[in-house]
Image (cartoon, grey):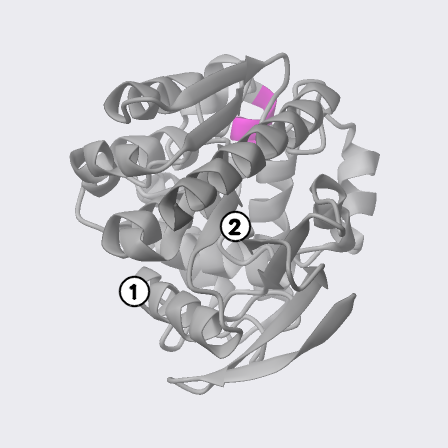
Amino acid sequence: MKTSGHVPVPGGHELYYELFGAPDGLPVLYLHGGPGAGFTEKDKIFFDPDKHHVLFFDQRGAGRSRPFASLKNNTTGDLIRDINLLLERFGMERVLLFGGSWGSTLALVYAIRYPERVSGLLLRGIFPGHIESTKYYINGGVRTFFPDAWERFLSHVPQKNRLHPARYYYRMMQSRDEAVREKYSYEWAFYEFSIFKQEPLQENEIDTLLRNYSYRSLAPMEAWYVKNNFFLPDNYIYDHAEALSQFPVSIVHGRYDMICPPVYAWELHRKIAGSRLRFTCAGHAASEPETEAALKEELDILYDEIQNRHEHEQT
């Protein structure tokens, strides 16, 4: 069963959503990455339509949400409020949060602020959203392993602006010149897709992928959130992570993740008592075979744990 549509939210946005699976199945909220990436049909491969009731939605400005690529009233706090509105709209009292990359950040922030609405966490490619992680990703941390990708990204930034390349990219993506906006949006996304798999894609493969991908929302939105430190106090997630031990938490992370180094997952795992961490022979992408398999296995484990907890609460 699938239903879809748009839900208006405060601030002039309309969020595209889909409900997937059995209405009486385990409630799951899927949080996509980016920010700005949107969700795709491929994201449904993790779920059993007979066991899970999954709410997918495109976050503000992403995918099929309207207005497209809008940064107005688009902050982490806005997205958190949107989640509450959606859960109330669809009668989901508690949900398993399934998020990867930026989706893991958003899931963690939501769980910290609204633990009573969360039954568990399944996280992939941990991005803690602190200053260290931002600097690593956008200030050259990857050049040890991907010097070519980093040099291409930096080559579009004048020498005087290279201490803060994200700010320069953001400014160019706000240009009145459409060709300039297009160039910098494409190059931002090209950089990300150059390093997101263990086995790097060739240039023509990346180009083909981007031609069918929402990089015109992904790039400016990521730059906007980076520029604003993801609208979070530094170290916010790690400072509050201990409180997340009250429900089951599974973490899957590629050991060769060049966007989010594995140490981020390790540090989070150490702070959440009882959490499970699985390193996979993979990079950042959820679609890499070992990561995909691990996510499905952990989802089955969490399903049983949450069902058992629910039955215990009823007795």
Expressed as whole percent of the image width and height from the top left, the position of residue 270 reads 28, 18
Residue closest to the eye, 107 or 177? 107
Identify the residue shown where x is 64% and y is 66%: 63
Expressed as whole percent of the image width and height from the top left, the position of residue 275 reads 37, 24
Secondary structure state at the residue bearing disc 1: helix
Q: Does the magenta portion include 276?
A: no
Sequence order check, earlier mark of 2 and 1: 2
Badge number at residue 34: 2
Give the amino acid at mark 1: Gly
Residue of label 1? 77
Mark 2 touches mark 1? (CB < 8 Å):
no
Q: Quadrant of the N terminus?
A: bottom right
Q: How many numbered circles are shown? A: 2
Identify the residue shown where x is 65% and y is 24%: 291
Q: Please name the predominant secondary structure of the magenta segment in the image.
A: helix
Identify the residue shown where x is 38% and y is 84%: 11
The residue most toward the front is 315
Q: Is 226 situated left or right of 9 in this image?
A: left
Q: Which residues are magenta?
A: 148-152
Tell me which corner region of the image, top left, top right, bottom left or bottom right, holds residue 45: top right
Q: Does the magenta portion include 151?
A: yes
Secondary structure state at the residue bearing disc 2: loop
Q: Is 108 situated left or right of 288 in this image?
A: left
Disc 2/disc 1 C-alpha distance (Å): 16 Å
Give the amino acid at mark 2: Gly
Q: Quadrant of the C terminus?
A: top left
Task: Reply above or below: 273 against 6.
Answer: above
Q: Is residue 133 visible?
A: yes
